[in-house]
């Protein structure tokens, strides 16, 4: 991949990462006022939980060779990720950003007693 492709992937990653807080504010606006902070905080907490899970296991399960459906754990804890191939690390960040966005869309909006 050339530098323009890598730059476009970095821009796309930044835009997807900006969508997560925007989605939290959107869901917070849809909820009743007493539940809006709870709804927004669940979206923000999912950033940390899913980001950590992606770094610990998700990268290895998604990008290593294994069977037809799932990779192995040979690159757990982001082992083998460096800046030798910037496009690969950009792809890893983009996949993590999409996973964060997907996790933040699931919320218990007004289903919990508060």
Image (tube, helix red, strand yellow):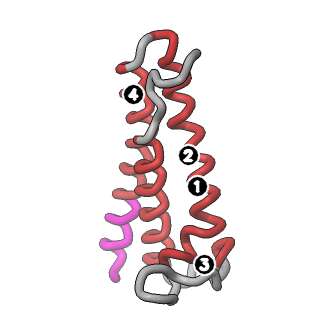
The span shown in magenta is 1-11
Q: Position of residue 78 (x, y in %)?
A: 64, 73
Between the C-alphas of marks 1 and 3, the distance is 16 Å
Residue positioned 46% across, 10% down in the render = 33
Between the C-alphas of marks 1 and 2, the distance is 6 Å
Q: Alpha-carbon neighbours of circle 1 within 10 Å: few (<14), some, or many (≥20)? A: some
Going from N to C along the chain, the mark reached first, 3 or 2, is 2
Q: Alpha-carbon neighbours of circle 4 within 10 Å: few (<14), some, or many (≥20)? A: some
Pointers 1 and 2 in contact (C-beta within 8 Å)? yes
In this rendering, position of residue 5 left or right of residue 28: left
Q: Position of residue 52 (x, y in %)?
A: 64, 57
The residue identified by callout 3 is 81
- The nearer-to-camera label among 1 and 3 is 1
Between the C-alphas of marks 4 and 2, the distance is 15 Å
Q: Nearer the viewer, residue 104 or 17?
A: 104
Going from N to C along the chain, the mark reached first, 4 or 2, is 4
Pointers 4 and 2 in contact (C-beta within 8 Å)? no
**Location of residue 57 with respect to 104 vertically, above or below:** below
Residue positioned 54% across, 20% down in the render = 37
Going from N to C along the chain, the mark reached first, 4 or 1, is 4
Pointers 4 and 3 in contact (C-beta within 8 Å)? no
Residue positioned 66% across, 76% down in the render = 76
- The nearer-to-camera label among 3 and 2 is 2
Between the C-alphas of marks 3 and 2, the distance is 21 Å
The residue identified by callout 2 is 47
Q: Quadrant of residue 1?
A: bottom left
In this rendering, position of residue 55 left or right of residue 13: right
Q: Quadrant of residue 77?
A: bottom right
The quadrant of the rendering that contains the C terminus is top right
The residue identified by callout 4 is 27
Asked if residue 80 lies in the magenta stretch, the reply is: no
Pointers 1 and 3 in contact (C-beta within 8 Å)? no
């Amino acid at each position: 991949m050339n530098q323009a492709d890598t730059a476009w992937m970095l821009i796309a990653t930044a835009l997807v990462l900006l969508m997560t807080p925007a989605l939290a504010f959107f869901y917070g606006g849809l909820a009743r006022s007493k539940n809006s902070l709870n709804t927004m905080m669940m979206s923000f907490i999912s950033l940390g939980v899913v980001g950590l899970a992606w770094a610990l296991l998700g990268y290895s399960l998604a990008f290593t060779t294994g069977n037809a459906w799932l990779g192995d754990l040979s690159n757990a804890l982001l082992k083998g990720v460096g800046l030798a191939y910037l496009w690969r690390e950009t792809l890893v960040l983009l996949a993590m950003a999409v996973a964060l966005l997907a996790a933040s869309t699931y919320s218990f909006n007004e289903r919990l007693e508060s």
